[in-house]
Image (cartoon, rainbow, N blue to C red):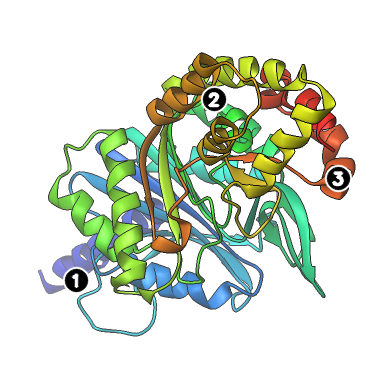
Amino acid sequence: MIKITTAFLAFALTMTIFSANAHAEGTTAAQKDWTFLVYINGHNNLDSYGAQNIKSMEQVGSSDKLNIVVQWASLANNDTRRLLIQKDTTGSQDVTSPVVQSLPRVDMGNYHSLVDFVKWGAQNYPAKHYFVAVWDHGNGWHLQSMGGNMHANDISWDDDSGNNITTEQLGQAMGEIATAIGHKVDIYGSDACLMAMAEVAGEMKDSVSVFVGSQETEPGAGWPYATFLADWENNPSMSAQQIGATLSKDYMGAYNGGIYGNSDVTFSAFDMSKYDSLLAAVKTLATELGGMNAGQLATVKTAASGAQAFYDADYKDLYDFVIGVEKSNVQAKATTLADVKTAVQNFVIESDNTSAYKNAHGLSIWLPESSDYTQYQQRYTGLAFDKATGWSQFLSKIQ
């Protein structure tokens, strides 16, 4: 009897270990309301913040309504890890959430890696709704050298490979992900600098329902995950729009005397169902401004130069630019300008900013000086936003 019991216990232990390993390799879990998928590219000088943000997530952890799943690439690790974030009750300074899959070091600057992660996450942690976030350096729709070996090319620069995810590839990734999950990505977010742009949103207009990001650079600590996740889990029935607005408010609060102290920041959320109306309004504006005489165009250029700018000076607040045109003496139709302002207000669900950006309204657009225009003109004409609006044709007139 003792031998039989011992054998049975050994068999049971073996099956338990097998079951645990099978789950670690991706046994499908029960469907929840939401899966939050965070693509953390720490293959750069932001690496230490990756672990900090994961620890912030572990203050809350996944729940019966929400899966929190992370792909974590760190310079400190030889592998790339996929984690199911669970609440840490140990008080450890280290990441304690289980590694459910370990991969050879992944090129996080390859958009296929992002698609693969989200497909894997949706398969193994299915949900009715998905929030996909890309965490790393960002630079809006184009590239910029930050000096030395530091680059911010579109988004997700990987120092190991030298690759990044371009704005066009980011849109392609969202399209492939939407096809894989069978509906639009409910929320896309950039925990990265300068991404709240009409041009970036345009590349994913048919595959994303709500877009969140910052017009300005983000401090290294990024999003306030603990605060945001706590608010989300306290109100799990929130819509995608409400979740986006909540994140915007929590981000603002974190840097306005909150958990991250005081820094000048911006954040906003977009309703992508209103994007086509924005395109139509901007197209009319571009046509009208582009048809003005040289004297009027010089005045428009002055308005562009005076609009609320951000770290990249060629990124300007669209709404504030229109206000500048209104205040000038150019003969722009009042209805044209009003239509753009209304379109921005309808498109931007939530816009929060500290006083340093009092003229920010949530949505940036490319309004370059001559050198920037010449450098990026050809690529810009290939963007969905420019194809729909002819914005570059207007820009060419004010250089």
Residue 393, position in %: x, y?
A: 80, 23
Where residue 250 appears, as percent x and y from the top left, is 29, 57
Q: Could you tell me the amino acid type at mark 2?
A: Lys
Q: Nearer the viewer, mark 1 or mark 3?
A: 3
Label 3 secondary element = helix
Seen from the viewer's position, the closer of residues 159 and 327 is 327
Front-most of residues 79 and 290:
290
User: How packed is label 2: few (under 14 Cα within 10 Å), some, or many (20 or more)?
Assistant: many
Q: CA distance from mark 2 to mark 1?
A: 61 Å
Q: State the SS at label 1.
A: helix
Q: Earlier in the sequence, mark 2 or mark 1?
A: 1
- Which numbered tag is attached to residue 97? none
In the figure, is residue 13 to the left or right of 359? Answer: left
Which residue is at 28% across, 57% downward? Answer: 228
On screen, residue 10 versus residue 332, left or right, reads left
The C terminus, quarter of image: top right
| Looking at the image, residue 36 lies above or below residue 103 | above
Image-quadrant location for residue 108:
bottom right
Q: Residues within 10 Å of mark 3 (few under 14, many from 20)?
A: few
User: Residue shown at 63%/48% (left/top)?
Assistant: 306
Residue 65 pos. (x, y %)? 20, 44
What residue is disc 3 on?
Answer: 370
- Pick the residue in front: 19 or 87: 87
Q: Which residue is mark 2?
A: 205
Residue designated by label 1: 6
Q: From this viewpoint, is residue 151 visible?
A: yes
Q: From the viewer's perspective, is residue 384 above or below residue 170?
A: above
Whether residue 61 appears in this view of the structure is no
